[in-house]
Image (cartoon, helix red, strand yellow):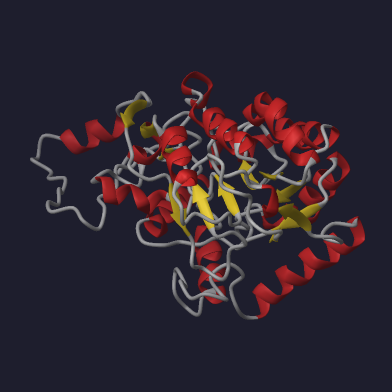
Amino acid sequence: MPAAALPGRGTGWAIAHRFTAERHEAFDDGWGTLQAAAGEACAPPPTLVREERVRAILARNDSPDIGFDLSINPYRGCEHGCIYCYARPAHSWLNLSPGIDFETRIVAKVNAADALRAAFARPGYAPRMLNLGSVTDAYQPVERRLRITRAVVEVLAEHRHAFSLITKSALVERDLDLIAPMAAERLAAAYVSITTLDPALARVMEPRAAAPWRRLQTIERLAAAGVPVGVSVSPVIPFVNEPELERVLEAAAAAGASRAFSIVLRLPWELSPLVQQWLQQHFPERAARVMARLREMRGGRDNDPRFGTRMRGQGVWAQLLRQRFDKACGRLGLNRARIELDLSRFRRPGPTPPEPAAQGRLF
């Protein structure tokens, strides 16, 4: 575990994952090597990208807490380095650390567009609500070079398949030439994640994501292009970004957001020790208080995986947060109407007739 935070990284801890066969422990040999190592300045490790060819790109969702049925994630891991990311533990399946590896060892699914086209061509495929970027940011920095997400959006546009996306990157503006025409036909919607308006807090909480003001500008540009856009004020961390809840909603609504949702911080698997170590590094005076409040909302545990409570929490504090959120949305005119996406326009490859009319609701 590093003694200090690494500049430009959410964490410097190569925490062991739950499938690790070996455990390593530091040993003091009496020559002061541990103290010397702790005092050494550590350079942030470079980002390494591994290309991978996948057999399937569509992941199915059976969670009643989530408003979509299918998801596409063009990458594994995310260079944005958000310390709170619930997807970090998924890196364990790659035999990589959910800590520093998650943000420095990125897997790029280079044939994602071809895999999606093949999925659409299957005789039994029926269009369903689809989300782009549910467990990785599809517009993270490496996308500028690889353009995998753009290729996926091109396939969605070619087959007129409705989709939503969620991102905290301004790079999504690059693809407005594809997204805006689809939105005009109720085939696309976007959510931008904004956790704080404080740039200093954003730098330690999500170090390589776009600055808060830039994300607000992205909401403004998406809305101006006719794309239905919402804001995700997630996750809410008590006593860290929680005091800003109403101000973030106000800024997003002023920028053009029409909808909003919010999720209380979740701490599955290895994420709990990672976040606790991060709190001790950056907010030692309130770390214990933050964890006490989170456990209060999670039935005394660090994490509550149950459907129905995992997103909102439970108890008095969870109810107060929900009331604050609902009242702010009501005052600002957010969530007055659902974003309706049209699944009936799907164009199957080949001469097969289109699917019968259907509509899907997003969040």
User: Whole-percent x and y of residue 239?
Assistant: 64, 58
User: Whole-percent x and y of residue 220?
Assistant: 81, 34
Residue 245 visible at all: no
Q: Nearer the viewer, residue 218 or 37?
A: 218
Quarter of the figure with residue 111: top left
Q: Is residue 62 left or right of residue 342?
A: left
User: Whole-percent x and y of residue 195?
Assistant: 66, 47
Residue 176 visible at all: yes
Q: Which quadrant holds the C terminus?
A: bottom right
Q: Nearer the viewer, residue 332 or 15?
A: 332
Residue found 9% across the figure and 40% down from its top? 30
Q: Is residue 46 left or right of residue 319?
A: left
Q: Nearer the viewer, residue 324 or 350?
A: 350
- Establish if 148 lies above or below 228: above
Residue found 90% across the figure and 56% down from its top? 332
Q: Is residue 56 left or right of residue 255?
A: left
Q: Is residue 179 left or right of residue 9?
A: right
Residue found 36% across the figure and 53% down from its top? 89
